[in-house]
Image: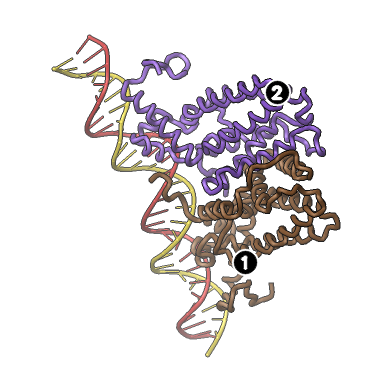
Chain colours: A brown, B purple, C red, D yellow
DNA sequence: TAGCAATCGGATTAACCTATCCATTTTGGG
DNA sequence: CCCAAAATGGATAGGTTAATCCGATTGCTA
């Protein structure tokens, strides 16, 4: 980071004072660690503690959890985009497709926070969502190419990737350290059934909008504790 | 329920007074509703509120959340045992096996609490765990029969069923009301790859003990809020 | 180097959770 | 029908969380 760098905000919203910038970096680094270990449910306070800054500093720099999530995971999402890009360069589209799923799921297994990010959406996290969309566009191509070779079943739907990430998150969250590689077996099972020819029909895909709603709902809960649960 | 029935406690631990017994039933009914909607993370207080009883009544009758979980889900687990039993009676073992998975996953989708129960274990919930074990024994037979016909892949492991439930729980939790049938598609994918001949090898199964540890860990968290997370 | 604005961080508020205490009410046997 | 034992439920303790306030400190500029 060059001094005075503007960490991608719009029109130079005033450079931070040196100590503020230093703390900002510390917070992001701490959040990276804490989110990776505890998932997005980790408290803001625990991040502040890990960073060695006061709670107020935490909230002054990142008024909402979503802003922190954006700052922490936008570059991880960048890596995610790279994974798709690399997959697109594979001369064998099916290989690329399979490799992408395995790598992406491995990223989930390695970072509980990122596992959550892939199954939630945060409308106000601009950078993060912009990169997610970029990845999505690339994935559409990846899927088409894999279908064109005839190795990927025809009824595969882009939103199935989200479902796969949700399933994987379920395994990763439930097993944790106790069985750190269990997810590989489930993902392998799923991949094998993605290969053409299909062994049978599938129930209809839920479609984009319902899944988006689901991801939105999940994301909402990240910042706001129980609200209308009992009413 | 016959009057004076001893709800399966060991040596008749003294019959409850009529009002106490009435409240006990109310609490269980309320918990059934609340857990189904909110999962096992629902608070004891919210159950008490739903039941229309005081918090103290709640805790006097069920001193720990595990005891409440035991009371609420032992009959649902009974239904689960029945599902396996019915599956065993199917003349076509593969049909029975597939039907069992679909039905069991449907039970998860219909009850967020039960979805949690199938991926966690609660050592002190005696009745519940006893029935879980009974179901497990029956499942071993179900699996062997399905393998014997050659329709179920040879490398399928009993603990894979737990993994499937974890994956399904991930989908169910993430989608919720927004896409209530999304799980069907994922489960269908998994089932299709379980059919022999296998399309490829699978990573080694995590094995029973690690998975049990994972389920234990998950179950612990149900009653006790964050403890040593940040220290 | 002086001083003001920016920044800091602990105390605080307000909500929620599990769990316990105890004054009051209810039940049911004699 | 009476009263002791059983059961009740609100108040409360002690824990967590998100979020805000404000006196003390620090950086930077002139």
Does residue B102 appear left or right of residue B73 in this picture? right
Question: Which residue has dot 2 on it?
Answer: B92
* Residue drawn at the location 62% of the way across and 66% of the way down: A127
Does residue A129 appear left or right of residue B204 in this picture? left
The picture quadrant where one finds residue B194 is top right
Q: Neighbour class for label 1 at 10 Å: few (<14), some, many (≥20)?
A: many
Label 1 lies in what chain? A
Q: Are marks 2 and 1 on the same chain?
A: no
Does residue A23 appear left or right of residue C12 in this picture? right
Task: Indicate which disc residue B89 carries.
Answer: none
- Count of marks placed on residues: 2
Residue A175 at least partly seen? no
* Foreground of the two, A216 or A44: A216
Mark 2 → mark 1, Cα distance in angstroms = 53 Å
* Residue drawn at the location 74% of the way across and 60% of the way down: A141
Question: Which residue has dot 1 on it?
Answer: A127
Q: Position of residue B165 (x, y in %)?
A: 63, 36
Q: Position of residue A189 (x, y in %)?
A: 74, 40
Eye-nearest disc, 2 or 1: 2
Q: Find numbered disc 1 in the image and state the secondary structure of the residue it sits on.
A: helix
Can you say whether A40 is above or below B132 in the image?
Answer: below
Residue B69 at least partly seen? yes
Q: Find numbered disc 2 in the image and state the secondary structure of the residue it sits on.
A: loop
* Foreground of the two, B48 or B12: B48
Q: Position of residue D5 (x, y in %)?
A: 29, 19
User: Could you tell me which quadrant the N terminus of chain A lies in?
Assistant: bottom right
* Foreground of the two, A73 or B86: B86
Whether residues under marks 2 and 1 lie with C-beta atoms below 8 angstroms apart, the answer is no
Pick out the residue farthest to the right. A91
Can you say whether D15 is above or below B52 in the image?
Answer: below
The picture quadrant where one finds residue C18 is top left
Q: Position of residue A81 (x, y in %)?
A: 72, 61
């Amino acid at each position: 980071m060059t001094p005075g760098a503007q960490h991608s905000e719009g029109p130079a919203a005033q450079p931070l004072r040196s100590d503020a910038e230093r703390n900002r970096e510390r917070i992001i680094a701490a959040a990276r660690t804490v989110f990776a270990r505890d998932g997005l449910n980790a408290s803001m306070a625990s991040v502040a503690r890990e960073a060695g800054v006061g709670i107020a500093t935490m909230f002054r720099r990142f008024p909402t959890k979503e802003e922190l999530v954006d700052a922490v995971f936008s570059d991880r999402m960048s890596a995610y985009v790279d994974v798709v890009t690399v997959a697109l360069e594979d001369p064998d589209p099916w290989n690329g497709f399979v490799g992408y799923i395995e790598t992406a799921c491995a990223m989930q297994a390695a970072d509980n926070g990122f596992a959550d990010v892939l199954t939630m959406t945060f409308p106000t996290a601009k950078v993060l969502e912009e990169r997610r969309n970029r990845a999505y566009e690339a994935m559409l191509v990846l899927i088409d190419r894999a279908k064109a070779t005839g190795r990927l079943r025809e009824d595969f739907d882009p939103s199935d990737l989200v479902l796969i990430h949700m399933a994987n998150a379920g395994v990763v969250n439930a097993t944790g350290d106790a069985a750190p590689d269990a997810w590989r077996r489930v993902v392998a099972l799923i991949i094998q059934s993605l290969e053409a020819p299909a062994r049978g029909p599938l129930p209809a895909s839920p479609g984009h909008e319902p899944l988006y709603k689901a991801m939105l709902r999940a994301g909402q809960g990240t910042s706001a504790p129980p609200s209308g649960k009992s009413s």
